[in-house]
Amino acid sequence: MEMIASILSSVLATGPFLAMIGSSILGVFIGALPGLNPVMAIALLLPLTYSMDPLVALAMVAGIYNGSMYGGAIPAILLRIPGTPAAIATTFDGYPMAQKGEAARALKIACWSSAIGGTASAIALITVGPLLARATLAFGPAEYFWIAVFGMASVGVLVGTDAVKGLMAAVFGLLLGTVGLDQLSGVPRYTFDQTWLLSGLDLIVILVGLYALPPVLSLAEKADLSGLSASDLKLDNVRVPWNEVKSLIPTWIRSSLIGISVGILPGAGGNVAAFLSYNATKNASDDPKSFGEGNPRGVAAAECGNNADNAASMIPALALGIPGNVVAALVLGALLIHGLQPGPQLFHQNPQLVGGFMVEMLLTSLIILIVGGAAATRVFAQVQRLPGVLLVPTVLVLMAVGVYVINGRVIDLWIMFAAGACGYFLEKMEVPLAPIVLGLILGPMAEQNIRRALLISRGDFSDLVTRPISATIAIATLGLIVWPIGSALFRRRKAAREMLDGDVQE
């Protein structure tokens, strides 16, 4: 009890407490600006933490991380522009809700879901972190390969109305992911002797192009001279009925568990957690066809899932020194800056600092309920009231500035416009865009791990399916692909037989 009291008193001291509030607000704004992301913000922050108290520095990291993960939902809902890669799934139902005049309601649900997911993740980090971290030791390259394949298959099959188109989109994403230096051999692939392609296609550039430009082009087509009125936006009526809150509880529980599970697996990330949570909620629903048309449970699942990954990704980072994602790697850098060595001994040698950081992850998740909801509803939702003809150039400028500041290269602007044009025509053909992005993210992960697994087994492919965990994930992946395609073929044959029977009767 004395240790707990000491940790709380140190975290609630003036410096760390103000750092948590200020960084949470800053994080919301960073996440809400397309092109900016928590990785960039925390990377810029780290050099400034040399002279800071470690708890203050880690409080700022926690606030920016949790705040920006929620902030990414704001443009995803209002403009269908994911502020962060993890907010892609939020666009599926958040943007249709905004189009119906329910932007404030969607933002409120996103805020609650983010806070609940982040809180559940922080509690997992505090209570069972060391135990869960040990479980990741059972995962090798073969298991990570199948996790990546399962993630791509789940999105390719379950997102959209046509499983074949979804899988084709995922394959296209895989092809994009092969551009650049081979991570194992160092051989350049599909670079066409262009040095700027050696590092591959930048995810944020592709993301902004695919998801931001198509709706801008659609707005330009409509030539809307009047935006939504305050009454249409329904900013004054942001209370969500208690019956709806109760209906979201199973979604929050399911998505929190999925997000935490994904978080403790190094390399997966909040985007995978959001997609898996969304798909699980869609599959469990009595009305799966309503997803993608403005179902609040879709927003709740995506936001709760991606935020439940936040603190959980710190579990292998703190306990084993293995970062669960890029932000966790930056946290390890912050610890090393202050002379602390991540790993199993960290909990024993510096329990107050580790415990303080865990509590800061918890408190910044709760702070989102206060600063997130107010900022999103009263400030950012006003964007919907702008006429479409004003939104088009405004969003284009924000896109261009956000993309240019990432690497300071003009070529990135051309890549963004090319990706946007591609996304625009793919949407016209009803091809889902999410599998492309996930293929780009998980493709390199799958390739590197299968090659590592084959190097370890000396080319024996049987090792990919003989290990119990690998075999389980492989069977689940096969079932995920075969079931919807088989169901679609069965429905088509049934419809054809009914048509033939009808012709015979006539």
Image (cartoon, rainbow, N blue to C red):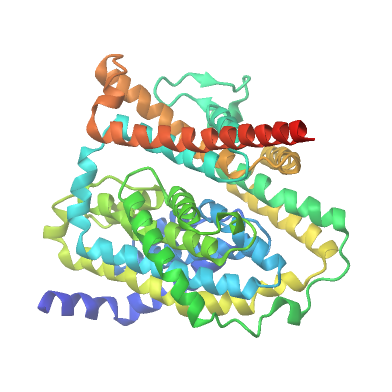
Residue extending farthest to the front is 505
Residue at (57, 56) in percent of width and height: 36
Residue at (26, 61) in percent of width and height: 125
Task: Name above or below for residue 18 compared with residue 466.
Answer: below
Task: Name above or below for residue 257 compared with residue 444.
Answer: below
Q: Position of residue 100 (x, y in %)?
A: 71, 68
Quadrant of the snapshot with the N terminus: bottom left
Nearer to the camera, 414 or 468: 468
Residue extending farthest to the bottom is 236
Q: Position of residue 412 (x, y in %)?
A: 66, 40
Residue at (35, 65) in percent of width and height: 57
Q: Position of residue 333 (x, y in %)?
A: 33, 51
Nearer to the camera, 359 or 18: 359
Task: Name above or below for residue 132 compared with residue 51.
Answer: above
Residue extending farthest to the top is 459
Relative side of 148 to 408, left or right: left
Q: Position of residue 31 (x, y in %)?
A: 54, 61
Could you tell me if residue 201 is visible in this image? no
Residue at (55, 61) in percent of width and height: 72
Question: Residue 416's image quarter?
Answer: top right
Q: How many marks?
A: 0
Quadrant of the snapshot with the C terminus: top right
Could you tell me if residue 187 is visible in this image? yes
